[in-house]
Image (spheres, rainbow, N blue to C red):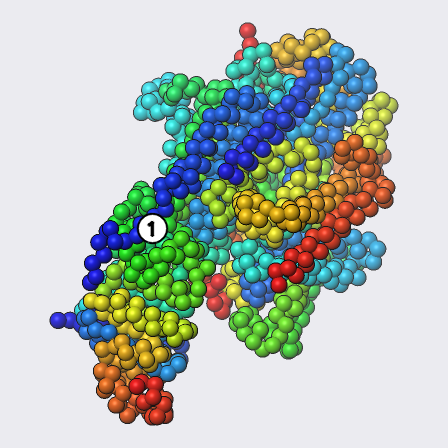
Amino acid sequence: METVVFALLNGLIYGLLLFMLSSGLTLIFSMMGVLNMAHASFYMLGAYFAFTLGQSTGFWFALFLAPICVGAVGACVERWGLRRIHAGGHVGELLFTFGLAYVIEELVKIIWGKFAVAYEVPAELNFSLFELYGAQYPAYRMFMLLVSITMLAGLWYLLKRTRIGLIIQASLTHPHMVSHLGHNVPRIFMLVFAAGCALAGLSGVIGGNYLVTEPSMAFSIGPIVFVVVVVGGMGSLAGAFVASLLIGFLQTFAISIDANFAEIFSFAGLNPEGDLGRITISSLAPMLPFMLLVLMLMLRPRGLMGEREF
Amino acid sequence: MTDYSVDLVPDLAPSSQYKFATRVLPLLLMALLLLVIPLLEPSRTSLSLLNAVGINIVFALSYNMLLGQAGMLSFGHAVYFGFGGYAAMHAMNWIETASYDGGVWAAFPVFALPLVGFAGGAAAGAVIGWPSCRRAGVPFAMISLGLAELIAAAGLMFVGLFGGEEGITGDRMNGVEAFGLSLGPIGEVYWFIAFWAFAGTALMYAFTRTPLGKLAQAVRDNPERVQFVGYNPNKVRYLVFIAAGGFAGLAGGMSAVNYEIFTPESLSVIPSGLVLLMAYIGGARYFAGPILGAIMLTYMQSNFSDYSEAWLLYLGLLFIGMIMFAPRGLAGLLLSAVSGIQHSLTVKSLLRWGAYCTAGLLVVVGGVTLIELAVRRSNGFGEVFEPFGLHLSPEQVLPWMYGGVLLAAGVGLLTALHKVGEGESK
Amino acid sequence: MTAALQLKDVCKSFGPANVIEGVSLEVKRGERHAIIGPNGAGKSTLFNLISGLFPSTSGQILLSGRQICGLKPFEINRLGLSRSFQVSNIFANMSVRENVRCAVLWSLGYGHSFWRNIGNLKEVQRKTAEVLDKVGLSDKADVPAVLLTYADQRTLEIAITIAGGADVILLDEPTAGMSHSETNRAIELIEMASEGKTLLIVEHDMGVVFGLSDRISVLVYGEIIATGTPEEIRGDARVREAYLGDEADFAEVTA
Amino acid sequence: MPKGIVWKISLSAFLLSGSLLSAEAETIKIGYIDPLSGPFGTAGDGGLKHFLHAASEINSSGGMAGMPVEIVGFDNKINPKESLIQLQKAIDQGVRFIAQGNGSSVASALTDAIAKHNKRNPGDELIFLNYAAVDPALTNAKCNYWHFRFDSHVDMKMAGLTDWLRDQKDIKSVYILAQDYSFGRAFTAAAKSMITEKRPDIQIVGTALHPVAKIKDFTPYVQKMINAKADAVLTGNWSTDMSLLVKAANASGHNVPYLTFYGGGLGAPTAMGESALGLVKQITEFHENIETSEKQLARMNGFEDTYHLDMFYQRVYTAMHMLDKAVEAVGSLDIPKIAGELEGMTYESPYGEVTMRAEDHQLLQPLYISTFSDDVERDVENTGFGFKTDALISAAATALPTTCKMRRPS
């Protein structure tokens, strides 16, 4: 029972963090067709900016300032990078962001050093909220939950209730339509790209101190973000939300299962010391998202709730 | 129906002279070059680098069968390199065992191990390609990424097959000697690599000239239309995928013999990314492009790190620069330079070339200065950047300004040149 | 003798929208059959159904008496049906010769072979040269397709369509966007190319349609309202009404 | 042909790079082959700095038998194949000693390649100074005459840790967590067998292997530990996996000792921060707060002033000074003889006597168990925290039997 409760709680937090990261990419991908491989790099920039800004302004200002800075960087990348190669097709754009991820990581190493930086949870939130089955539940996690839900609500409001949101929504499903409506498409692209990056930055701000802020943090989380976007489906924020939570729960549940293949498939007579029999479900946990990705693309390429195929 | 007898139809095929110059001659030159290199008595470093280059040429060309020829962007090509390499590595150990205990493998020369690699890579391609080649474009790329992650993880889990992260080692000095090569000294390994690099290149070139090779290009250009000339584009992709896997496996087999070790790291996404960079930076649109890319990146990987610890940053910047300004890659740049020289060798064009080169140089010098200063400053132990006898300290403002000014001047000049060029073309 | 192509009550709907509603059509062997109709009548959709690009919702399509519903486009092509596209659909980065060569390979039985040098396949070379000569693109054989003029691209489109030697040829607006003189050349080309074959053509240019076809079918809102010789169609009141709603104009353009 | 041109250019560049950097006979070159860029660049970079500092120390007192020492860094990107290319480069540049430490996979590739090289090129031999690769196999099944290990391997450290555990009567149950690769598995196996042997009353309430560098949030693992009521956690984790584990443990209020090998690894103290205080223990041959001589303190200060980095690898100095001693004894660069001198050598390190055991070329040295604490004289990574000694494990206690069958050149 306690395993289930904890897996649910942790899966929820991890899933929401993933959703904050991938919602931006879903917007960018659905609208511009750019599968931004550097998206997690903006997440990393968010954490580093928050660390630096936090030293002078404190965490709370950094919480707002850092995503804005990340968004500005994103706008520059779109304006002087992606826009120039847009005509060359999506493969060129994909490769551009692939190279950008390399460059951002190296720049971060030069600016902030190669080691992890001491980006800590703010003292105001560094206490334990309640105790559950002998383990304490840190307040910061609740705060993360709060921020991501606020963000989710804000995004929903923006998309459903504002003019720009309606345009963006229209172009999620019908990217060619918007230019016919007389809107300045490059500017909308820049805005969406910047906003997507800012969302990634925000998740960096609250995820960087919860996890670790170091130069390889982008590389290690990057692929999972794709998985969320692809599994969720093109043009579907709701899909990304479901996929994030799914992956969050899947991973945390798998970790809590200690059984190995030899036990599960005991009827097949697997040797528990053999390579196959030795594999435990929990050691497979990090692989599950990729299995999900491959299966999803092969069986249902439009994703869980996608409006269309790629 | 009108009778078109053979003699009435004009012969549209290119002349045999043209064929020789464009198809046979480059391969002959490559063979000649491979034969000449040992006469220059290269050092051990050069030989080991050349061997690495040879392996990467075959690997990058095999990747380009997918990217350049069939238009399939894969993030997991190292998987086939790895399967081929492991197949060859296991075979190498069977040869060793057989040389003591006897058996079928005793008669198999180590020299021919890349063939085992080819079989391994092609088999892996046939199994993995079956589900993944039913999708094209971005879904294909994503499937390849997902599978690459899964297989890289499996590489560490199945110790019996992949040897854990320490991999499998072997000894190439066993079994039957072919061509009188013991394969002990690195100089003899050179001949082994040269032979297979040439064979691989020639075969992959030949592949582009076959009906299947041509159809792969048709699928790249227009998969929809291919269906209406009687072909199933998925099947064409699948077959090309198997062939590409086979040649990647061939490169893996070469690697197994050259290094006598194979580790699961070779299956991972990092070499897959590197081979993508090789093919793209070299020029995926041209057959010879990946060869250039393989040479350049292998050299950079092994030697740039001697000069700058920021070499990965330079690599990333180079890659981005190529995508933005030279999407046809190094091969494209070379070809346009050659045709520029052939067609418009005027004072004006020379001046413009000069101006472009100067601007490019300014950007590079300024950028490098700034990056190197930044690296030293970030290391923070007072190291000074000393290019060409200069003494640039990251603690002073002036060196930063030098770098900044040079970079700004270069960018400014480039912008100006671009505007002039646009003005003229209008 | 079975019809070259026969459609029995073919329907196609995209979600709630019925684009094709019970089309039945019979194209005889060796016949040149045109389909006309106003924009949005479903002509291109009909072609996509016949050639296998879309599955039909219901009904039967028979090629020489053989059911081809549910087959993949390349399977239908292998049975001897070839089509062109309204928007040029060629292999842009390959030369004209290579474009045509790709189109002749299957019919000559080279399948997916990867052990033969394509340059040594005399039969392929001859057939390719023959097709290029027939459509008059021989002098542009080595030009990359993307650099051709629009009219030449349309010609290449037809060349690719006929290169495989299919018995039934579907042409989707082959003269769309052409100038008058180019159209005349195109008509000649189509006449020559369809000699001894069965031709089904969608065309807007009434001059082309009435000059070329043996029979004409009129498709309006997904239904065939009339089929007949050019004379019969010209005189059909329903067609006049439905097609243009303006008798004078119709008489004029079909004259 | 463009192909040809580039070939020639790169070819001449190859040849140039070879000739420019040709060897000088008077210098002793030590090739440092470790990652200097990429994700693991930090680890290799730190090691290089220790070697540079040790070399300057030796040079300022007249070099090795009058020959100055030069450290040449080669970036292997922690890739076995790339290491072999760099090895060839090093040999070309006149390097006769190879130093490496990061990654047992690289070490086993190198020791294999060096043994083959020495067999195939007599008179041109190399010595391999392994300063940190701890796979037991390297001085057991895979041992060879040219390989010398200056770090205590997994089983030795585990022996030390379990010796200490013998006296910790309040620890009744442990949880073992390690990364799912050969090191982690060796760690788990050693922990299980040694605990069962030395403290049969301790219950192993759980073991888990997790993939390297893939887990973002270790809370579920910590939760399992809490559920299992573990009194202590044994972990082989290093780098990010180490810091993330400790952060998760702290967040869940899991206040039990974490017994680690790499709790003090570069970057980990910063990342763990306050959360690790009093929890994380490590077993090492060195940390900065062990009582020692003025001379050693001066060395630490010297290193920190030069490189703005904490001293971490005492064993690098040990290796360099033992090599110095061997070269002085031989008087020339006769590699087989130098290897012979190193074999069985004893050396007085600032923290006690160490011995290079002849039968397997494994250094036996005293080990220290220490706790992450804020009450320390010298802190690490400017965090204000450092390590404080709990216990000393004598060198003899770590001496485990070896399966090595050393074949010596005749």
- Within 10 Å of disc 1 (Cα), the crowding (few <14, some 14-19, many 20+) is some
Assign a secondary structure to mark 1: loop
Residue drawn where x is 22% and y is 83% of the image? C228
Viewer-side residue, D174 vs D216: D216
Residue drawn where x is 60% and y is 72% of the image? A168
Q: Which chain carries label 1?
A: B
What is the quadrant of residue C114 in the picture?
top left
Viewer-side residue, B387 vs B27: B27
Tell me the quadrant of the picture where the N terminus of chain B can be found: bottom left
Q: In this view, does C221 lie to the left or right of D8?
A: left
What is the quadrant of residue A138 in the picture?
bottom right
Q: Residue furthest front?
A: B346
What is the quadrant of residue B395 in the picture?
top right
Q: Can residue B167 be seen in this view?
A: no
Q: On screen, C187 above or below B382?
A: below
Q: Can residue B47 be seen in this view?
A: yes
Position in image of residue A272 (x %, y %): 44, 38
Position in image of residue B361 (x %, y %): 70, 44
The three-letter amino acid code for the residue at tag 1 is: Leu
Residue drawn where x is 57% and y is 38% of the image? B296
Tell me the quadrant of the picture where the C terminus of chain B can be found: bottom right
Position in image of residue B201 (x %, y %): 43, 37
Q: In this view, does D320 lie to the left or right of B96?
A: right
Position in image of residue B49 (x %, y %): 56, 29
**Residue named by callout 1:** B12
